Image (spheres, rainbow, N blue to C red):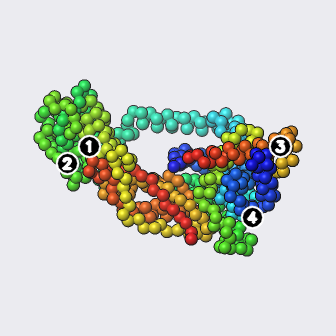
Amino acid sequence: MNPHVLNEELDQQIERMVTRTNAQLAGSSSLLAIASELCHLPDPDFKRGLQADLLDEAAPLDSSSDRSRMNHSRIAAFSGIMPTLTGKGLRVFPADHRSFVVSFASHAALVFLIASGIWVGQRPILRTTEILSSKLTYLGSGGGGGGDHSSIPVTKGTPPKFSDRQIAPPVIVVRNPNPALPVDSTVLGAPQVKLPQSNQIGELMSSNVILPSNGTGGGGGAGSDSGTGLGSGRGAGVGSGADVGYGRGISSAGRGVTAPRAIYDPEPEYSEEARRVHFQGVVVLSIVVDQAGHTRDIRVARSVGLGLDEKAIEAVKKWKFEPGVQEGHPVAVGVNVEVNFRLY
Amino acid sequence: MKTLEREPDERQLIEAAQSEPARFAELYEQNFARVYAFFVRRVATREEAQDLTSEVFHQALGSIRNFKWQGAPFVAWLYGIAANVLSSHWQKLGRSPAGDEMELSDSGDDIERSVLLAELVELLPPDQSRVVLLRFVKQKSIREIAYDLGRSEGAVKQLQFRALENLREKLGRPI
């Protein structure tokens, strides 16, 4: 068909469409379908007008009724640097410079206390233990590392036992050969997880089979990154992740890691709010499926609101998976799941 | 898949708006299109959609200080207000939402598509974007647009056609 004729026909159909209110197109042309959607776009003049109204409304909310005189240029000034210090512009009451001096002095004192370590030093150490304990309610996704900045890679060997407390980190080169209270070295992780043991502490995959070395990393453990664990990761566990327990951290499916498979996925409930207005949508949740097939670290990656996000989370918390597997071992895998809310 | 990785920024914006309501403008800018899209297919006229959108943002501004961050995106809170506003609107009109096909055809996916389309229109060449605005949003005739822009009617039709083709091509690409 002649492009000119095609264009004319398209325009005639668009004309019919825009002159009807909220018309729904019966035509199958994809261009007409887009044209139909364009009729639903907001008017930029309305958007700007509403924004101006809201700014006017925001002005008195800031403190007193005198703010109703605030115009838009003064709103811009509101975002300026320390307007109360100069007393210019927006405040109803004149700025009191003594308030500034008192505020400055108290903040300076606080900064000094923090910087000097006095305030931090008085905080109970127990808090750290509490945090570590709560992390051990799951098996951990693995990760440990350390070293003493040696130029030689960590010695080949096996990790020490897992424990929910770590007093002595795993080391190959012991700096204090006669400690007052000798204790076995451990790595943080669920004690029920058993790894192969030998007389030589070290990293299983290391190429250094001769020289004793804590590795090239830092932090007190053994390995090539940082922490009090063992491996190429960060943390007090074992492996290349940054957590506790054993493994490579949270993996993604693919490249030798199988995706977890849902084996129990009850339907979510519809929220009353969404049902009332016949709202439908797909909530996307970012989750981690741990080695036991449980879901954790659930985060909304795409929200639809109206209570459906919460309903999706509620349902996914109950889901059970066959965990992802790498090299024959279950591993924690991060995946996105779609929870579809449809009314039939 | 497009992921909304904006939580930390959004939280800061909310806290800023709670201490300085004038900063609400930034939250408005981020969420306006979604709230408008929520209403536009559920009501009969553009004016109704505008009134209801306006109502949502006025209510949100009035109660922004009561908002408690719980990790959900801010727009989820706005949709909650929007649902109540829509429900009240239907009550005032004395009709029930059930049985109205327009409401059933809409979904969160449609909202995201509308937002995407609005963004793509802004990325069109300026003359095409202008024609789209005048033709579809302002609902002017080709003759009126030609007069406003000082172009021939044929040129305006051509711009309209190219704009639609551009949008079709961009919408067809994976985002």
* Crowd rating for badge 4 (residues with CA inside 10 Å; few <14, some 14–19, many 20+): some
Q: In which quarter of the image is residue A277?
A: bottom right
The residue under the point 61% across, 68% down is A278
In front: mark 2 or mark 4?
A: 4
Read off the residue under disc 2: A195
B90 or B24, which is in the foreground? B90
Q: Are marks 1 and 3 in contact (CB under 8 Å)?
A: no
Q: Do the residues labelled 1 and 2 touch (CB within 8 Å)?
A: yes
For badge 4, the amino acid type reads Ala
In which quadrant is the C terminus of chain A drawn?
Answer: bottom right
Q: Disc 4 versus disc 1: distance between alpha carbons?
A: 62 Å
Whether residue A209 sits left or right of residue A245 in the image: it is left
Read off the residue under disc 4: B44
Q: Disc 2 versus disc 3: distance between alpha carbons?
A: 77 Å
Whether B81 is drawn above or below B130: the answer is below
Q: Which secondary structure, mark 2? A: loop
Read off the residue under disc 1: A238
Q: Disc 2 versus disc 4: distance between alpha carbons?
A: 67 Å
Q: Disc 1 versus disc 2: distance between alpha carbons?
A: 10 Å
For badge 1, the amino acid type reads Val
For disc 2, the chain is A
A331 or B175, which is in the foreground? B175
Read off the residue under disc 3: B154
The residue under the point 15% across, 43% down is A183
Residue B87 position, x and y percent, is: 66, 68
For disc 3, the chain is B
Residue A21 position, x and y percent, is: 78, 61
